[in-house]
Image: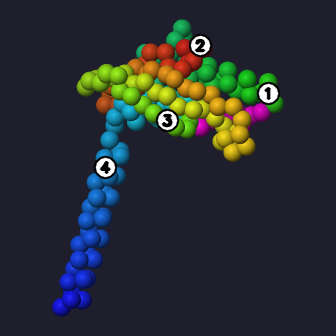
Amino acid sequence: MAKTNMIISFALVILLAVFFQVLFVFADTRETPERAAREFAEAYVNYNREALVNRLCETNLIVDGANVVDAYLHRQAQRAKSLGYSLFWMKDCLYHLEMEILSSGNSQARIHLTAERKSPLRRFFGGKTQHVDETLDLVREEGKWKVCGGPFSLPEA
């Protein structure tokens, strides 16, 4: 009898763990302004064209007839080339990323983002850290949160 109770208890614990795991997965895939800001910031420092285009609002994607993301990536590739690197070696990571919601609504949000930006190799060997302090304006377009305004240095195309 005791062995049966132990098996039932163990099975119940396993079922509850699976249920909560599925619940947490669904909660993690929910579209939020914080998630959009994080994805955009990480794509910005990793030079990820697809993620930048997906998270940048339509009004800011083309400025003066030029694609802002392509211009940004071209500038960074030229900078890397002048230093003797490919763009791959210039990628950075964000550490200690913190976000504060300044305002939030159904279709607009404003998030203050702070982080430390550093190359993974320089993080390992020491070196300089760049402090990131940015306020991002987000709007909901087509059911997805996107970054608008002048995020980072993208408008300098």
Q: Which residues are drawn in magenta?
A: 85-93
**Mark 4 / mark 3, whichever is N-terminal:** 4
**Mark 4 / mark 1, whichever is N-terminal:** 4
Q: Position of residue 33 (x, y in %)?
A: 36, 30
CB atoms at circles 4 and 1 under 8 Å apart? Answer: no
Q: Amino acid at mark 1?
A: Leu
Q: Position of residue 115 (x, y in %)?
A: 53, 31
What separation in Å lies between label 3 and label 2 (alpha carbons)?
24 Å
Q: Amino acid at mark 3?
A: Leu
Q: Nearer the viewer, residue 119 or 91?
A: 119
Q: What is the secondary structure assignment of the residue under circle 2?
A: helix
Q: Which residue is mark 2?
A: 156
Q: In this image, 46 relative to 108: left or right?
A: right
Q: Quadrant of residue 143?
A: top left
Q: Quadrant of residue 95?
A: top right
**Residue 66 sits above or below residue 18 on the image:** above
Does the rendering let one see residue 62? yes
Q: What is the crowding at mark 3: few (fewer than 14 residues within 10 Å), some, or many (at least 20)?
A: some
What separation in Å lies between label 3 and label 1 (alpha carbons)?
28 Å
CB atoms at circles 2 and 1 under 8 Å apart? Answer: no
What separation in Å lies between label 4 and label 1 (alpha carbons)?
44 Å
